[in-house]
Image: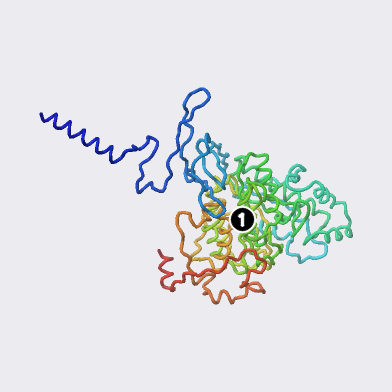
Amino acid sequence: FFLKIYLVAMEGESKKRQIDNPDPQPPNKRVKTEENEHEEDIPSVLEKEEGGDEKLHDEKVLGTDVATSSAGRDPEGTQLSSYAPPGAGRGYYFMDEWRPVTHEEPLKVGTGTGLVYDERMCEHSSLTDETHPESPMRIKSIYSMLLDKKLAHRCTRVEAREATVDELRTVHSESYRQVVSAIKNLGEMPLKTMERMYDSIYLNKKSGLAARISAGSTVEIVKRVVEGKLRNGVAVVRPPGHHAERHASKGFCFFNNVAIAAKVATDKLGVNRVLILDWDIHHGNGTQHMFEDDKKVLYFSVHRYDHGSFYPGSSDGGPRKVGNKPAEGYNMNVGWNGGGLGDGDYIGLFHQLLLPVAYEFSPQLILISAGFDSARGDPLGGCDISPNGFAHMTHALMGLAQGKVVMVLEGGYNLSAISQSFAACTAVLLGDPPKMLGRVFPSKKALRAMMDTKRYHAPYWMCCTRSASYEQPQFTLPGVNGGLNDDEEEDKDYSGGEDEEEDDEDGEGEEEKQQENVLPSNQVEEEGAD
């Protein structure tokens, strides 16, 4: 009797549930909850193939499933569909493209720090101007400092060599290569005539040889790092290279040393992703032009821009230049509008922009176009980075690319500053910890430049979008750049020219003025302490 009553009650309860919920939840649907209400329904995962068999082919794959990826976004910054295309398998969206997850064999990792240097590069000198800033004493003083600090003895010496014809052809035209090769056969008057053909170049009979040794030595040390014979390396070379174009010399440069090494690494050594960091105070116009169509190379340049008026004096160094299709987003320019930028500005840039982008890109090799004309005391740069500041910048990169970092000398014209700065970076690559910097902050002009670059790269990099994880409040921090307050900093003339322009005359870079959240100094200090 009691069993019959129980069965009748259960039957009534079942009918009541069917009336309240006439459409049962399909097996491939998830019940909406507060935790997953933002997610879309999982599409059907079964599809008939020609043979009649059912195959599981589609699953929901989020862009954040891969640590080194960026969620795909449209130009307005909204996230694209998180679903894989039919039959694609596991993968992620990166720069509006679906990329399948594939197994990638890591490169071999070696030990030791390589050092390449050759006295023959000192034979390139000016015939008419003994005081020219790009003098042979630049590399002589650096090498002497490495010996004095006993850093050279801790390095593995790499034999310098000339670049081969095939290596030079990777980024330079054959006609231009032949022009540089013919320099050795010219007399004094033809050399002076040839100097006037190019921008900021001097020549002697040994200039072509020095340029080939500078390029070939860079390629050789990069090759050894990629092949796992060395962990990292430094190249004390001249003439520099990042201004050299495919078909012309420019800005003291003949062959683009770093560009040649990067191209050899991607074309012949099996490297799929190269990060070129150019911290020379001048924009590396040549390197940018050589890779603005190449998705294997991410070129990141931080330089003095001055609204397009600082050398090389064009809008190519502005934040709007993001690269050409299909490599949009792989060219990043951070241009300072004015001088006086120091350790806090560069360290802030590294943590706020460079490193987040680098971790998304996940490079296999890092090449530093290490111009030290942004160092304190340089006659051309007008900036204020200390040797220890450069050391911290180098140290921050060593956690990427399995530590495969090669530093190649570019500019820098204060002999004491470049020697101490190069030695500090070399010590870090050898494993010495950098000294403490103390409390440093980025200045307002640095924050504006970073925001400009982030704005133009928001469609391409997740870390540059305002919708990424959380927004950091923007504060005006006092006491930056050696203790100057904001008013003193803006009034101080570092460069002999206008420190900062109110209007964006060339339309390149300055973001529209926004209201800033200014805190009293005591509250700012509490924020920094937290």
Q: Residue at x 56, y 57 (%)?
A: 393
Q: Quadrant of residue 411?
A: bottom right
**Rendered location of residue 452, percent (x, y):** 58, 62
Q: Quadrant of residue 166?
A: top right
Judging by the rendered image, the residue that carries numbered circle 1 is: 332
What's the image's color scheme? rainbow
Q: Residue furthest front?
A: 19
The N terminus sits in image quarter: top left
Q: Residue furthest top?
A: 51
Is residue 104 visible in the rendered image? The answer is yes
Is residue 120 visible in the rendered image? The answer is no
Q: Nearer the viewer, residue 367 or 507?
A: 507
In the displayed structure, does residue 85 sit left or right of residue 170?
left
**Rendered location of residue 320, percent (x, y):** 63, 59
Badge 1: how crowded within 10 Å, few (<14), some, or many (20+)?
many
The C terminus sits in image quarter: bottom left
In the displayed structure, does residue 425 sit left or right of residue 173?
left
Q: Nearer the viewer, residue 377 or 369?
A: 369
Q: Amino acid at mark 1?
A: Met
**Rendered location of residue 475, percent (x, y):** 47, 68
Q: Residue furthest left?
A: 1
Q: Secondary structure at mark 1?
A: strand
**Rendered location of residue 70, percent (x, y):** 52, 48
